Amino acid sequence: MHTSSLVSVIIPAYNHENYVQGTIKSIIEQSYQNIELIILDDGSKDSTWQKIQELQVECEKRFVRVVFETKQNEGSCKTLNKLLSLAQGEFVYIIASDDLAKPNAIEKEVEFLANNEDYALAVGDNEIIDSEGKRAYWGNNKALVYEENDAKFLTNVAYLQRGKGFNFNTEMFGTYETIYTANYIPNGYLIRKSIFDIIGEFTPEAPLEDFWLMLQISKYAKMKYIDEVLFSYRWHGSNQMNNIERMYSMTEKTMEYEGYILDTIDSKKVMIDIDKIKEFGVLYKKQGIPFVFELLTYKKLNNKLKLIKLFNMEICRYLKI
């Protein structure tokens, strides 16, 4: 195991008083030892900041460096940029303040990235947990169920992979063309920090931060899916994906900014055919985005996923991937 590489675990925290200590403890319990922990509270209105401070002494005993800060509310982009500016590690592990990392998550992902320099991201599967931290599954319309026999999908990747229509254990995982229409990279990813020197900072012009991030990384490096549950993704009423109208608006804005990026970057420095993507982008903006969000409101989950899979297959044929 590579133990010399410093990993910066960064936690953007906001209004998660009931969950943030669980998130921190899941990092304390990591089998990988060389970790610095950086938490930035984005002006929480509840007791999140107090809950973070309660664990400071314990964290200072466990980690090689600890930075806990709070600030006025500025939103996720500025919060993530500040966290990245404080990070000193070779790798960065981003985790929301209501999710949990499995004890071997960072160890597994460091081991891969340390031995594969052409990859900039490694991630595993996500189990689903409810608001109380209980293991759950997704049934119809992603409603939580607690018996495997009632489940449509046992994990997040089972759902994502069926919709995308390709095996995540192949070289197609993490390619720009497959991400372009919708982000499918699971949570709990480790990133090679040097990639941010190339892609730059998060921006409010691309309000879907994860989508923007994956599009940028996939232009310059490969991503690896590790076929093992390494993360617990909390599914509750405040999940952003539940607000379809807001997601529609944020997706349009993010795609518009991506179009600007494609117009300004050096085509010789990326691993994609920019002209082909831009040609497809015009069609996708007119037809694809409305189609995808119409599917999000479709109630029959199996039929919806079948249509999404066919849509993605058409995209792949169009882009010849």
Image: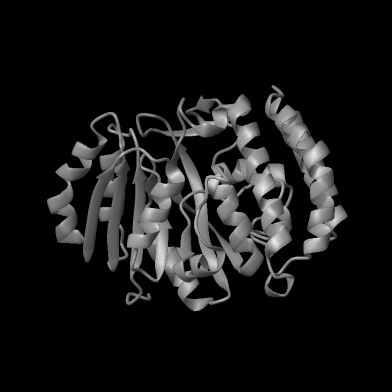
In-front residue for pair 156/216: 216
Residue 16: x and y, percent?
A: 32, 34
Q: How many marks?
A: 0
Q: Is residue 96 visible?
A: yes
Residue at (83% x, 51% y) in the render: 280
Eyeballing the image, is 42 above or below 279? above
Decide if residue 161 is on the left or right side of residue 51.
Answer: right
Q: Quadrant of the C terminus?
A: bottom right
Decide if residue 244 is on the left or right side of residue 67.
Answer: right
Residue extending farthest to the top is: 299
Residue at (49% x, 46% y) in the render: 126
Residue at (65% x, 32% y) in the render: 248
Eyeballing the image, is 290 above or below 77? above
Q: Quadrant of residue 268?
A: bottom right
Residue at (22% x, 43% y) in the render: 52
Residue 230: x and y, percent?
A: 44, 53
In-front residue for pair 49/183: 49
Decide if residue 270 is on the left or right side of residue 226.
Answer: right
Residue 292: x and y, percent?
A: 73, 35
Decide if residue 193 is on the left or right side of residue 69.
Answer: right
Residue 94: x and y, percent?
A: 42, 53
Q: Quadrant of residue 42?
A: top left
